[in-house]
Image (cartoon, rainbow, N blue to C red):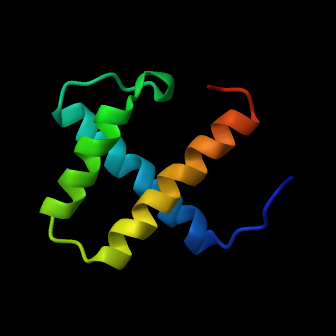
Amino acid sequence: MERSLSSNSIQAYVHDVELLNQFLSLQKSPLSPEEVTLSHLQDFIAYINELGLNDHSQARILSGIRAFYKYLMMEDLV
């Protein structure tokens, strides 16, 4: 199943994944998607909360990360 996304949505998803990647780089954690653990994601949630983002922005970022992992699973990449 393929979703039709606007270029703004695609850019937002890319930004969300890049933000997670930057966070993992700062933590010296594994960068490959299959090595990211629940603990990494919990730490990432705390990190975006510390950035002072409002609840809506945090939820949108997490939605983007979720969509990224759903895509990877759908394509058998993780």
Q: Judge left or right: residue 36 versus residue 44.
A: right
Question: Where is residue 77 shown, x and y percent of the image?
Answer: 66, 26
The residue sitting at 30% across, 75% down in the picture is 55
* Rendered view: 31 above or below 52: above
Question: Where is residue 20 shown, x and y percent of the image?
Answer: 34, 45
The residue sitting at 38% across, 29% down in the picture is 37
Count all numbered tags in the image, as a single digit.
0
Which quarter of the image is occupied by the C terminus?
A: top right
* Rendered view: 56 above or below 50: below
The residue sitting at 20% across, 53% down in the picture is 46
Taking depth in this image into account, of 35 and 11 the one nearest to the observer is 35
* Quarter of the image where one finds residue 48: bottom left
* Rendered view: 75 above or below 18: above
* Quarter of the image where one finds residue 21: top left
Q: Judge left or right: residue 13 versus residue 23.
A: right
The residue sitting at 27% across, 46% down in the picture is 44
* Quarter of the image where one finds residue 75: top right
Question: Where is residue 47 shown, x and y percent of the image?
Answer: 19, 52
Question: Where is residue 67 shown, x and y percent of the image?
Answer: 59, 53
